[in-house]
Amino acid sequence: MPYLNTVDLTVRYPFQEQDVLKGITLSIEKGEKVLILGASGSGKSSLALSLNGIIPHSMEAEIEGDVYLQETSVNQLTFSEVCKHIGILFQDPESQFCMMTVEDEIIFGLENLRLQKEEMDKRIEKSLGFVGLEKWRKTQLKDLSGGMKQKVAIACLIAMDPEVFILDEPTANLDPVSTEEIFALLFSLSNKFNKTLLFIEHKLDYLLPYLERIVVLNKEGRVKRDCPPRELFTHYYEELKEQGIWIPTICEKAKEMEQTGVIWDQFPLTLEELENECTRKGMASLTDSTLSLPSISSKETVADDYLVEVKNLTFSYKNHLVLNDASFSVAKGDFLAIAGPNGTGKSTLAQLLIKLLKPTQGEILIDNKSIQQYKTKELMQKVGFVFQNPEHQFITDTVEEELAYGLKILGWDQQAVSERVDQLLKQFNLIAQRYSNPFSLSQGQKRRLSVATMLTNNQQLIILDEPTFGQDQVNTEALMQLLKELNEAGKTILMITHDMELVLKYAKNVLLLNQGKVNYQGDVLSFFEKEKMLEEAQVKAPVSYKLAALNRKLREGILLC
Amino acid sequence: MLEQYQMSSHFLQQVNPTMKLVSMLLIIFYMITVFDPYTPLILLVLTVCVIRLFGGVPLKFLLLILLPFSLFSISFIWINVVFPDTRGTTILFSIGSMPVALENVLIGVSLGLRSLVFASWSLLFVLTTDPTRFMLSLIQHCKLPPRFGYGMMAAYRFIPLFKQELNQVRAAHKIRGLGEPRGIKERFIEIKRYSIPLLASAIRKAERVAIAMESKGFDGNRNRTYYHVIHWSKADLTFGMGILFVFASLYLIRVNFSL
């Protein structure tokens, strides 16, 4: 008897032409670790909310079929009964709490279960102990970092002790180190107490080895595949690509190698498996052809003509030293990634560059002129700045006006404005949305528009503060491609990011900021070689880089023989 | 910022929030019946001292918050002097051709001090009450449905977040070349521009929080247990006696000095 099963579940939201979920029949056993995979808009989150009865109890929707917990239909249970069986961990750490302190938030759930005080105390201690936050019991939630908030959210669920944990992209807003911690916590939870884990997730590289089963939803909201991961990536690789689903880096390389004639005994899902397979087969390298890192020579070195010069920059905020005597220069045409752990002043640095903040000491030159000497309007024509949340930048009612806005301020005439707007709409693939309200666009369109508004008058420098945060794979890829094109057209790009895969693939140079100081500035490959420095700054080399290292190892192995 | 006062372990912080709320309302009603300037003055000084001594709030901080309120109350004096209902007969001096009468000044001072008493009692409540305890007390003693109580808590949590977000929106708009607004019309347009992104994110957040609360088993009805039970304690008795004592003394003073 499966613990949780859905029978022919169909869900349609009001005023929608199409069902989000269509005829879903799934059964999940106790202790299983399942991943729900699907492109954006394939109804993954709707499925999660249908499983615990939020749909249709509190979110209006037409629903057919049924969801059963053991043998009871979810629709016959109240919320406080359902949550003894199913707990959901959500994506946004800010908006899943309703109380002020860590303790009170856990208590909130336990009170809903109508437990007695002694039992609550036991459960609070146990759950905080499990996530390692005993010392933070009385702390205000707002004083915690994003990663710690997610740990508190996990503790809340553990305290309520459900059988099934649904994890709806819980790490989408977290940095790589916190992401790994959260996953490790979840798997130890599953192993220790035999809990069922149901993931909805894009970050597969880390997750894959632990999963037992992947359910693929297609764009119509139907279950397309339901099988173990190895089988899925071996047999249905093309199908996944077609659906716009992100493929783990290792699987992608393995498939590439398969096309060059390699036959796998066991299709590799992790780096270790790939290495073992290769050594066993005595392969000289991963492939001889295309599979390699972007070598230093292929990324043309940039001229030493500087666009930005930062000299001895110091900034303190409320007696707290954020930037400490940082100096560096950015050459014209560079694509510079700024990396570093959370809270080391990356965003502060970016805001100093556009005069949103004033340095305590030191100087910033743009085009050989101190930025203090620029008027805001002049600086705006030199530098574009893209914020993390695109919505914050929108000031008008249509996409077209949004693009024309900056040009009008500069006093361009009507003709020139409309020509430039047309050009931008085309370049950023927003022609169909010309008269739409910026707030009604999709995530990816909003992101593109926010970049486009920053290019209206040919700014030479574009600064982006974590532009791919919370974006899905397709949008991320599209945005990066756009930035690459802009960079090739001569724009200088300065991007704050946590995503090292993007750094390796797109950036020309990296600047590592740690504890307010510049620890490294130089090309990407040498950056990832400095293992000790990376470890100190909590930066992890991406899988592609590790692949290249493996490639080198295999080649050297052959030479030694 | 206020938590350090709200959470401290002084006497006022231990009084039941409902008790404080009721006495605040009593004081406000009482003040409506008073027209002399001395009663509110006594009450104001007393309240400030109580907040300092039994609430542990530094005097400097307290006076700093009261400062904007005092500007407001000075305006009462001005209004009563310049636009009196009936001009008094005891002329103190004249500003230009306008006579300033003692009676009008006193009424102005009385009204001004009254508003300061309201402000100081609100501060007594806000600075010494933990919002969570307040909400629990309303649910446990005043029959507030949990649906609203916990809903209010969730909303309260978002206030600092909105402040942060407003700053980001402001910065983002500044980058796009929008300067400080000039004149009322521009200010109005600015408010509209800021409110759309903030509203959009508020609605989204509210929906998410509601879903998160329900998926933790919250159904809004009264059938739940409480970890923190807000008790009636000796502190409440002492506080209540104190309030009675204040009213009694004020009554005696007012009778004796026929205010």
Image: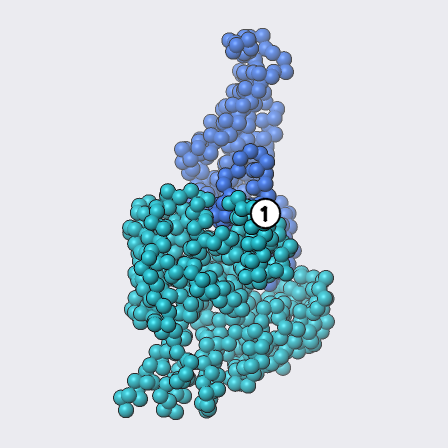
Chain colours: A cyan, B blue
Q: Is residue A260 left or right of residue A551?
A: right
> Which chain is indicated by disc 1?
A
Residue name at image x 54 percent, y 61 percent: A427
Residue name at image x 41 percent, y 75 percent: A544
Residue A180 placement (x, y as % from top left): 43, 69
- Looking at the rendered image, the quarter that the C terminus of chain A falls into is bottom left
Examine the rendering and report whether any part of residue B259 can be seen.
no
Viewer-proximal residue among A217 and A556 = A556
The image shows residue B203, relative to residue B36, as above or below, that is below
The image shows residue A33, relative to residue A533, as above or below, that is below
The image shows residue A285, relative to residue A303, as above or below, that is below
Viewer-proximal residue among A16 and A506 = A506
Furthest residue toward front: A415
Residue name at image x 40 percent, y 69 percent: A504
Dot 1 alpha-carbon crowd within 10 angstroms: few under 14, some 14 to 19, many 20 or more: few
Q: Circle 1 is placed at which residue position?
A: A414
